[in-house]
C-alpha cells in the first residue's frame, strides 16, 4: 500500500513539473506575442498569426504527439534532439497551451478603451508606460481567463504525453488500461482531476488579487 501511494506521489510530482514548465514557457511566449499583435497596426498579419495558432489547436492530441515525434526524427540529423521523454512532451503541451493565452492577451489589449489610452497619453505617459500602467492592468482579467483555460487543458493533455515517456499520471492510466486494472486508472484520473480543480481555483484567486482596485477592496 505504501509503495502504491509513493508511486502515485512521484507521478503526481512529475505531472506538476510538466504542467508548470509548460505554463511558464507558454506564458513567456504567448503573453508578449498577444500584446504585440493587439497593439500592431498590421491587422492582417495579426489575424494570420492567430489563425495559424488556432489551426494547430484543431489537431487532435494523439495526432499532434505523432506529428511532433515525426518532426523531431526528421530534424535529428541536423539538430540532435530527444524523440522520447520530457522534451517532446513539453513541446506538445506548449503547442496546445499557446492559443487561449495568445488569443485572450490579444483581445484584452485590443478591447482597452481608446479614450483611456488618450487620457494616458494626455497625462504625458510614453507608449511603454501606458502599456504597463494602464492597458495591461485593464486587460489582466481576460489574460488570466486564457491562462486558466490553458492550465486545465495542459493537465488533461499531459496524461497523453506519457505515450512518449514524459512521465506523469498518464503512466498510471496507461498501465491500468493495458492490464485492465481499475485501481490504477482511478489512481491516475482522480489526482489529475483534483490538480485541475485546485490549480484553476488558485489562478482565479491570484487573478482577483491582481485586478485593478483589488487592494482597495481588501482594505
Image (spheres, helix red, strand yellow):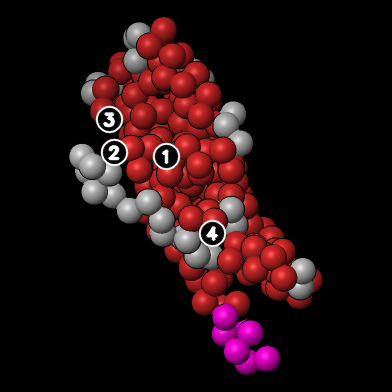
Residue bearing the label numbered 4: 162
Dominant SS of magenta comes to helix
At horizontal 47% and vertical 61% (from top left) the residue drawn is 165
Image quarter hosting the C terminus: bottom right
Residue bearing the label numbered 2: 75
Q: CA distance from mark 4 to mark 2?
A: 22 Å
Q: CA distance from mark 2 to mark 1?
A: 9 Å
Looking at the image, do the residues carrying marks 2 and 1 touch, with CB atoms under 8 Å apart? no
At horizontal 63% and vertical 85% (from top left) the residue drawn is 4
Secondary structure of residue under mark 1? helix
Q: Nearer the viewer, residue 102 or 96?
A: 96
Secondary structure of residue under mark 3? helix
Answer whether residue 58 is visible to the viewer in this image: yes
Secondary structure of residue under mark 4? helix
Q: CA distance from mark 1 to mark 3?
A: 44 Å
Furthest-bottom residue in view? 2
Q: Please identify, in this view, whether the residue under mark 4 or under mark 2 is nearer the observer.
A: 2
Looking at the picture, how far across and down is residue 11, in whole percent? 54, 72
Vertical arrangement, residue 182 with respect to residue 158, above or below: below
The magenta segment is: 1-7
Amino acid at each position: 500500500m505504501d509503495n502504491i501511494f509513493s508511486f502515485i506521489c512521484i507521478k503526481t510530482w512529475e505531472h506538476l513539473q510538466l504542467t508548470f514548465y509548460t505554463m511558464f514557457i507558454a506564458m513567456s511566449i504567448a503573453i508578449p506575442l498577444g500584446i504585440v499583435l493587439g497593439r500592431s497596426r498590421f491587422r492582417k498579419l495579426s489575424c494570420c498569426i492567430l489563425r495559424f495558432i488556432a489551426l494547430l489547436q484543431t489537431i487532435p492530441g494523439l495526432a499532434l504527439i505523432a506529428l511532433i515525434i515525426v518532426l523531431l526524427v526528421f530534424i535529428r540529423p541536423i539538430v540532435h534532439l530527444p524523440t522520447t521523454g520530457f522534451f517532446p512532451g513539453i513541446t506538445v503541451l506548449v503547442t496546445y497551451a499557446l492559443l487561449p493565452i495568445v488569443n485572450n492577451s490579444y483581445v484584452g489589449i485590443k478591447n482597452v478603451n481608446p479614450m483611456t489610452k488618450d487620457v494616458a497619453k494626455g497625462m504625458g505617459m510614453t507608449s511603454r508606460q501606458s502599456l504597463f500602467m494602464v492597458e495591461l492592468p485593464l486587460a489582466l482579467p481576460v489574460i488570466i481567463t486564457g491562462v486558466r483555460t490553458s492550465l486545465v487543458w495542459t493537465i488533461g493533455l499531459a496524461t497523453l504525453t506519457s505515450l512518449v515517456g514524459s512521465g506523469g499520471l498518464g503512466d498510471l492510466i496507461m498501465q491500468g488500461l493495458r492490464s485492465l486494472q481499475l485501481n490504477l486508472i482511478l489512481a491516475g484520473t482522480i489526482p489529475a482531476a483534483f490538480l485541475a480543480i485546485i490549480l484553476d481555483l488558485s489562478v482565479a484567486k491570484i487573478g482577483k488579487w491582481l485586478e485593478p482596485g483589488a487592494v482597495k477592496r481588501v482594505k
